[in-house]
Amino acid sequence: MNRLSTSWGAYDLTRFPEDPRDQLRAWSAADAYLLRHLAGEEGAAAVDLAGTGTVAVVGDRWGALTTALAGHARVPVQITDSFLAQRATRANLARAGHVPDAAHLLTTRDTPPPRVDVLLVRVPKSLALLEDQLHRLAPAVHAGTVVVGTGMVTEIHTSTLELFERIIGPTRTSLARQKARLVFSTPDPACAPGPSPWPVSYALPADSGAGAGLTVVNHAGIFCADRLDIGTRFFLKHLPRARGGAHVVDLGCGNGVLGTAASVADPDATVTFIDESFQAVASAEATFRANAAADATAHFVAGDALTAVPRGTVDLVLNNPPFHSHQATTDTTARRMFSGARAALRPGGELWVIGNRHLGYHVQLRKLFGNAEVVASDPKFVLLRAVKNGG
């Protein structure tokens, strides 16, 4: 837990799931800079949050902005792509003493507010996700809307500013403070950006192993949105065939191509697609519907690893774990996925994991499962198989 001090008060904030070993903060200098600006501490007049209409907060990573604003704006609306960020926001709001309805929490797949009077944007890592969200919110912005973005200087590029300029209106940036910067955009009614270009789709080439010929659908923000990433391509060339009627989990599913390929290979399998990204789950469902048999069974879950899956009910877990949390490199997510997989698997069930060789996942798997076999490898990737023995 770490404390964010503002002119409105101090807030003890945590990420989700809470992990005492995790030293990463639940807020950044970019969040603090934006809050100082809104309070009138950066040389400009304070923004009238209480007297205005709808305040929308896009991309609030762990709820720091929403928690700080909850007592000063009229029920701020948070819009996030992250299930974990949404859970962290609820916990941080409660810790700050706010009632459950002190903020309205939406996902990037929900319909945005029809009118937005203050639009605050925590610039995401994905330029595509920023583009999609600005397109979705542009109809709600009017000439009097205050639009302010924030991010670390390493996250705000010329292309970032060009998106604000093209979709919202004239855009400028602030001076840098503690390696953070603000983005000011003035809504221009003459802007006519049109609909979002997302989602996009493409067909996998013949050299894609079990995925050859599949149609992939990607909503904005999904890793390698316009092509198959090389790790998944390698995995598809060695994809295990599930036993008839097996329960397969595509964990950290992204666009769902692994689970979809498993379903196409065995239409009797039940496939559960899980990701903490709402955009990813929507992509996985679209990919599955575009390829799977009409009577194939699948479930789509936005959640925290395998916590929503009953113990001992899964035969096969396919996993390409992320090793970044925003800008930080960490194995926290992978460790949580591996331990969740062991709990969810039936005795004899298997976890198949693809990862960069240098990550050393075999060490963690051997500690957890007592075994880890190299199925295939190349100079960059290694595909591992761990079997749950006993209960």
Image (cartoon, grey):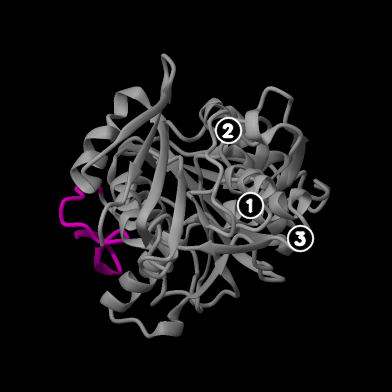
The numbered disc on residue 139 is: 3
Quadrant of the image occupied by residue 281 = bottom right
* Residue designated by label 2: 236
Element at badge 3? helix
Q: Which residues are magenta?
A: 1-24
Q: Quadrant of the C terminus?
A: bottom left
The one nearer the camera, 54 or 223, is: 223
Pointer 3 or 2: first along the chain = 3
The numbered disc on residue 284 is: 1
Q: Which amino acid type is shown beneath numbered disc 2?
A: Leu
The numbered disc on residue 325 is: none
Q: Is residue 294 left or right of residue 257?
A: right
Pointer 1 or 2: first along the chain = 2
The reply to whether the magenta stretch includes residue 153 is no
Please name which of the two marks, 3 or 2, marks the residue nearer to the observer. 2
* Residue at point 31%, 78% (across, down): 94
Mark 3 Cα shell of 10 Å, populated few (<14), some (14-19), many (≥20): some
* Residue at point 74%, 39% (across, down): 214
Q: Is residue 77 left or right of residue 140?
A: left
Q: Which amino acid type is shown beneath numbered disc 1?
A: Ala
Q: Is residue 274 visible?
A: yes
Relative to 67, does residue 163 appear above or below in the rendering? above
